[in-house]
Image (cartoon, helix red, strand yellow):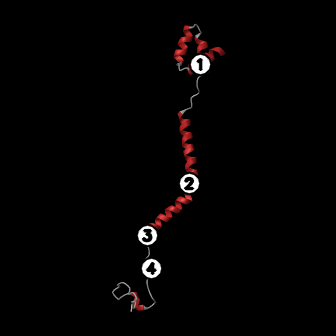
Amino acid sequence: MPDLTDYVRKQRQSGFSDEQIKTALLNAGWPQKTIDQALAGLKPKKIKASYIIVGVIVLLVIIFSMLFIFLGPKIQQQIEDLKGLNSPPRLPALSNGSAADSGDEAGGPPKLPLFNLS
């Protein structure tokens, strides 16, 4: 039987299907039971799709967790910086200390000191 399993393995590697191998062995006089045992012993193990899906989900959770742990504080700081950009900038108050510089009674702009250019 080791010779038969080697034959089956080599034929599969050559691209033949199990049905083609089985037909060739039956035509060569091999018993059906022996062929079935050889084919069953070399069946490639299939991984269930659900295991692959669960593995991918777990991997994604781990990746996003690591990104959140390492990059979370930086991203949060950038968000805070962007929030500060939404408010208008403060204008400085100009004053030389006198009450007359605070503007007129109607709430107009403050009076700026005049310079003597002579």
Which quadrant of the figure has residue 89?
bottom left
| Above or below, 106 relative to 25 | below
| Above or below, 98 relative to 6 | below
Inspect the image, locate mark 4, and give the three-letter code of the amino acid beneath it.
Answer: Pro
Residue appearing at x 55%, y 40% in the figure: 54
Tag 1 secondary structure: helix
Nearest to N terminus: mark 2 or mark 4? 2
For the residues labelled 2 and 4, say whether their Cβ atoms are less than 8 Å apart: no
Q: CA distance from mark 3 to mark 4?
A: 15 Å
Inspect the image, locate mark 2, and give the three-letter code of the amino acid beneath it.
Answer: Phe
Residue density around tag 1, few if under 14, some if 14–19, many if 20 or more, within 10 Å: few
Q: Which residue is mark 1?
A: 10
Measured as percent of width and height from the top left, residue 101 is found at 40, 89
Q: CA distance from mark 2 to mark 4?
A: 40 Å
Inspect the image, locate mark 1, and give the three-letter code of the amino acid beneath it.
Answer: Lys
| Left or right of residue 42, residue 107 in this image | left
Residue appearing at x 51%, y 62% in the figure: 78
Tag 3 secondary structure: loop
| Above or below, 16 relative to 72 | above
Q: Quadrant of the N terminus?
A: top right
Q: Which residue is mark 3?
A: 87
Nearest to N terminus: mark 3 or mark 4? 3
Inspect the image, locate mark 3, and give the three-letter code of the amino acid beneath it.
Answer: Ser
Residue density around tag 4, few if under 14, some if 14–19, many if 20 or more, within 10 Å: few
Q: Is residue 61 visible?
A: yes
Task: Tell which of 101 and 69 is nearer to you.
Answer: 101
Task: Tell which of 35 and 115 is nearer to you.
Answer: 115
Tag 4 secondary structure: loop
Q: Which residue is mark 2?
A: 68
Task: List the single residue furthest toward the left.
Answer: 106
Nearest to N terminus: mark 1 or mark 2? 1
Q: Which residue is mark 4?
A: 92
